[in-house]
Amino acid sequence: MSQAAPIVLNDGASSPVTFSPERVTPESSVFADRSSGVSLRFRRLRVALSPATNTRSTNRASFEVTVPVTSVVNGVTSVAFTMRGKLEFILPDGSSDQDRKDLFAFMKNGLSDPLLIGNLRDLDPLF
């Protein structure tokens, strides 16, 4: 089992952002970017794992990012909206290590594909 430690990821400007453990459990762990100093503005990552059970033969692993965007109205700062992204892997208990490596590579590399970037980031529809 992996021990929770800070996660450092680049943002859209390639600046490193550190997400520190905020709540850690084997089922669902949350990491927060506390650099703003204001909890209202903390960006968060969630990493979750739900192992297969007697009634469900699939393992579910997910990674989620939450980015609140704030605005100031009449001197009061509030969350104007929250952007979210979620990546979920549904892995049958019978999948091999290589099967899981292939799926992970397709997902990771897909996020670098210009067509998918246009759709997911730039909101360009496919036609």
Image (spheres, rainbow, N blue to C red):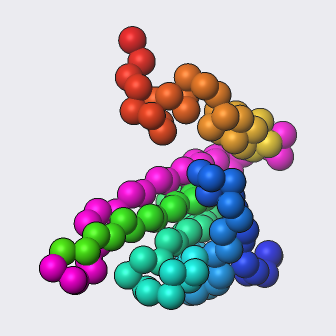
Q: From the viewer's perspective, tell me whether residue 52 is left or right of residue 100.
A: left
- Image height check: is 111 above or below 25? above
Residue furthest to the left: 74
Q: Quadrant of residue 80?
A: bottom left
x 62%, y 37%: residue: 111
Residue 85 within the segment the image draws in magenta: yes
Instruction: Name the residue nearer the viewer: 79 or 32.
Output: 79
Rendering coords of residue 59 (x, y %): 61, 56
Residue furthest to the right: 98
Rendering coords of residue 32 (x, y %): 56, 78
Q: Quadrant of residue 124?
A: top left
x 84%, y 40%: residue: 98
Q: From the viewer's perspective, tell me whether residue 68 is left or right of residue 2.
A: left
Q: Quadrant where the C terminus lies?
A: top left
Residue 104 within the segment the image draws in magenta: no
Instruction: Name the residue nearer the viewer: 93 or 40.
Output: 40
- Image height check: is 26 above or below 114? below
Main SS category, magenta section: strand
Rendering coords of residue 25 (x, y %): 61, 83
x 50%, y 87%: residue: 37
What residue range appears in magenta? 74-99
